[in-house]
Amino acid sequence: MTTPVVSIAHHSGFGHTAVLAEAVRAGAADTGAEMHLSLGVSTGAAAQTNVDEGPDAVHKAGIATAEHLGRRVARTAEVFLRGRSAVAA
């Protein structure tokens, strides 16, 4: 089986988005996906986090949401790779 490859592009002006991007990477990596993390645009996964604060202020719910997003992205990549019927089996 081919391993899904997931790339996360983000921009982190104050550091909190980098924390969330890392959580998305961790969630996707939990599924066995090959991960690439790079600078680009915001993930938008931190509704509970003040965007003007640094990485230490990232709310734990935002990190959990980002990890969940990473797992869903990796699972979707797997579906695209293998086909829906192969994943369901």
Image (cartoon, grey):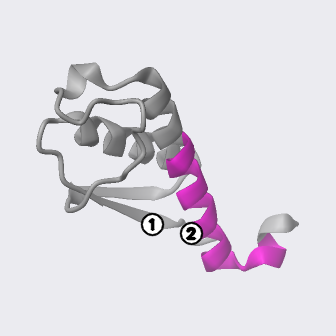
Proximity of marks 2 and 1: CB atoms separated by less than 8 Å: yes
| Element assignment for label 1 | strand
* Position of residue 16 measured from the top left corner of the image (x, y, whole percent): 24, 34
In the picture, the quarter occupied by the N terminus is bottom right
The answer to whether residue 39 is above or below residue 19 is: below
- In this rendering, which labeled residue sits more in front, label 2 or label 1? 2
Residue position marked by numbered label 1 in the rendering:
5
The residue at the point 35 percent across, 39 percent down is 20
**Magenta-colored span:** 68-86
The residue at the point 43 percent across, 58 percent down is 34
Residue position marked by numbered label 2 in the rendering:
77
| Element assignment for label 2 | helix
* Position of residue 79 measured from the top left corner of the image (x, y, whole percent): 67, 72
Magenta segment, principal secondary structure? helix
Q: Residue furthest right?
A: 89
**Considering only order in the chain, which callout, 1 or 2, is on the residue closer to the N terminus?**
1
